Amino acid sequence: MSSSEVVRLILIALAAYAMGNINPSIIIGKIKGIDIRKEGSGNAGMTNTIRVMGMGAGITVFIVDVLKALVAVKIGLHFGGRYGAMIAFACVILGHCFPAAFGFKGGKGVASAFGAALALNWASALIALLTAGVLFGITRRMSIASLVAALSYPLLVWHFAPEYLYFSIGAAAFLMLMHMSNIKRIAKGEEKPLTVGGKDK
């Protein structure tokens, strides 16, 4: 790998991390005079946004988180090929979960991971999303839906885009790690169903 290619990959990583720092949950909360990281579960993501600020805010957060990651990975793919795409995927999620712009405290990366996965291979991402949707409809618990979707993702990638298999295993493991508190609550039977707060309640 040439020095110019290394520089290009570094720039892709920095750009993707910066895009991950765009956290709509925190931004919308500030507009409404709410610190989302001090309300509800304290997580700056879609689920807690729905609980605290309502469905409209939650849907907005989902769309922005998906789009920022999708664009980041598409940029990585265009300028750095497969390695650029994987680096962008990893860095945009890290930027979302640990944003330097917001004290390194962000969300858990589910919506952003979906956007990144959509850019990497749309078929595996959409089936994982469908799986999550079905499970959420059954359980009303977003964490269970997200965890099962994360676990299914490497199997789907193995079928649709095996060149990304090992990377997808790492991505799934990272999402599981980010949900350790949820896993503990699920094991104890203490995980609460999703409720809608804010003006939509």
Image (tube, rainbow, N blue to C red):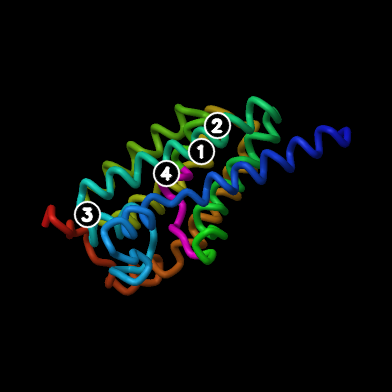
Amino acid type, callout 3? Arg
Alpha carbon separation for disc pair 2 and 3:
28 Å
Alpha carbon separation for disc pair 1 and 4:
10 Å
Q: Nearer the viewer, residue 189 or 201?
A: 201
Q: Earlier in the sequence, mark 2 or mark 4?
A: 4
What is the magenta range? Answer: 105-113
Q: Mark 2 = which residue?
A: 120
Name the image quarter holding the N terminus.
top right
| In this view, 3 is above or below 27 | above
Amino acid type, callout 4? Asp
User: Circles 4 and 3: CB distance less than 8 Å?
Assistant: no
Alpha carbon separation for disc pair 2 and 4:
16 Å
Graded by Cα atoms within 10 Å as few (under 14), some (14 to 19) or many (20 or more), the crowding at tag 4 reads many
Q: Mark 3 = which residue?
A: 140
Marks 1, 4: nearer the viewer: 4
Graded by Cα atoms within 10 Å as few (under 14), some (14 to 19) or many (20 or more), the crowding at tag 1 reads many
Q: Give the residue displayed 60% in from the left and 30% down from the top.
A: 75
User: Circles 2 and 1: CB distance less than 8 Å?
Assistant: yes
Q: Earlier in the sequence, mark 4 or mark 3?
A: 4
Q: Give the residue displayed 43% in from the left and 52% down from the top.
A: 23
User: Residue 168's x, y, as percent?
Assistant: 57, 43
Q: Mark 4 = which residue?
A: 65
Decide whether residue 148 is among the magenta residues.
no
| In this view, 118 is above or below 148 | above
Alpha carbon separation for disc pair 4 and 3:
21 Å
Q: Determine the secondary structure under disc 3.
A: loop
Amino acid type, callout 1? Ala
Q: Mark 1 = which residue?
A: 116
Q: Nearer the viewer, residue 77 or 28?
A: 28
Alpha carbon separation for disc pair 2 and 1:
6 Å
Instruction: Left or right? Give the position of 82 relative to 62.
Output: right
Graded by Cα atoms within 10 Å as few (under 14), some (14 to 19) or many (20 or more), the crowding at tag 3 reads some
